[in-house]
Amino acid sequence: MPHGLHFTCLLAAGLLAAGVLPAQATSHKWSIVVHGGAGVIERESMPAATEAEYRAAMKTAVETGAAVLEKGGTSLDAVQATIQYLEDNPLFNAGKGAVFTADGRNELDSAIMDGATLNAGSVAQLTRTRHPIAAARAVMEKSPAVMLAGPDADTFAASKGLEQVDNSYFFTERRWQGLIKQLQKEGKPIPPRPAGAPPAPAKPLAMLEPADAHKWGTVGVVALDEAGNIAAGTSTGGLQAKLPGRIGDSPIIGAGTYASNHSCAVSGTGTGEYFIRLTIAREICALVEDKHMKLQAAADEVIHKQLEGIHGDGGIIAIAPDGEAAWSFNTPGMYRARMSQGSQPTIAIYSDEP
Ligand code: ASP
């Protein structure tokens, strides 16, 4: 150990023993950005009560992560805590409230990435783990793998003590009716109501919004902590009526999720196939790192030129280690929120909001 480092360690150990925490070498202003999915979300077709519910949930989400960062917590912890809140909230297409596959099951994908180390973990096709983001984190920290899929991924999560639930835990009437409407429209067979789901309501549920209003609804978080480290995470049920076995961009490192302290952290939402083809998240960070573009300009370039260039739809949130935060999307709306140390949260839904 170099002499100087040895001395620093001794000093730190001495201070800790005395109950004094050494001051941060450098203290960054923390910052966090959250999305709750992009899509055809329009003011005219959004009931006021539904809009209020989404705004309140996005506020709680961003404040959940902010509370972690305000206490000096890591960006990884802030990302995980925020996403777990969103996974538990049935409004969003992640965890409870996820959309269904064409054969009537919930299959969940998630990823997390640490910008400081480039360590990453991801899971695909989970059917039993309550918090897919926690499973992704466990893959990152407790396995030599980056990605696990299928029943073995659930078994791994269970072996690390993560809560397991019946697949019907993720069921919501709203998503089920959304699936049936979409399959009817496409002339496809309707699967049986899942075992363990509550009995069908006597009269159809008053829909929160048109059934196909949110084809997406994935959740994602990017954060910068006081130590200057950035992280990204994403969690989703994927696309409504997806082919069983289909894996989207969210758990693909570089496509729907990416983080590097050398450039930026990104989480995406949209039709995953386009995000995979363009490796959207990594592409934005590459423009920042290699072309020295500002984050917002890089995000707009990739979403409005590259993604639109192949007729893809969706959006991203991003953050850079210098604290610059950005969002960019080419859909009528994206549920989103941001907050920085010392400021109030900003919540937005429609494209005409700042
Ligand atoms: N990107 C997700 C997927 O394709 C869907 C979403 O954003 O809601 O799986």
Image (tube, rainbow, N blue to C red):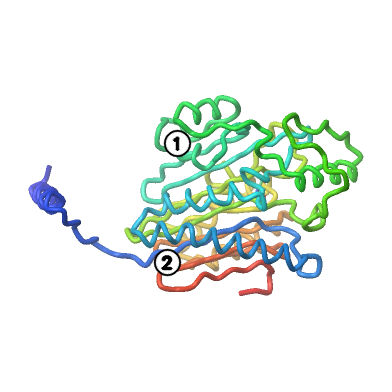
Along the line of sight, the residue nearer the viewer: 323 or 342: 342
Q: Write down the quadrant of residue 187 in the picture.
A: top right
Q: Residue at x 83, y 31 (%)?
A: 192
Query: Where residue 18 is drawn, which disc sits there?
Result: none
Q: Residues within 10 Å of mark 1 (few under 14, many from 20)?
A: many
Q: Is residue 287 above or below residue 1?
A: below
Along the line of sight, the residue nearer the viewer: 57 or 178: 57
Q: Is mark 2 within 8 Å of ligand 1?
A: no
Residue type beneath disc 1: Ala
Q: Is residue 314 above or below residue 255?
A: below
Q: Residues within 10 Å of mark 2 (few under 14, many from 20)?
A: some
Q: Is mark 1 within 8 Å of ligand 1?
A: no
Left or right? Give the position of 164 relative to 353: left
Q: Residue at x 82, y 39 (%)?
A: 200
**Distance from label 1 to label 2 (Cα)?**
27 Å
Along the line of sight, the residue nearer the viewer: 55 or 328: 55
Along the line of sight, the residue nearer the viewer: 171 or 139: 171
Query: In the rendered structure, which disc, 1 or 2, sits on the residue that comes first in sequence?
Result: 1
Left or right? Give the position of 180 relative to 89: right
Residue type beneath disc 2: Gly
Residue 130 percent across, percent down from the top left: 57, 38
Q: Which residue is mark 2?
A: 323
Residue 34 percent across, percent down from the top left: 55, 59
| Disc 2 secondary structure class | loop
| Disc 1 secondary structure class | helix
Residue 184 percent across, percent down from the top left: 90, 42
Residue 237 percent across, percent down from the top left: 66, 43
Left or right? Give the position of 219 relative to 31: right
Q: Nearer the viewer, mark 1 or mark 2?
A: 1
- Residue sitting at the far front: 202
Where's the C terminus, which quadrant? bottom right
Query: Where residue 138 is drawn, which disc sits there?
Result: 1
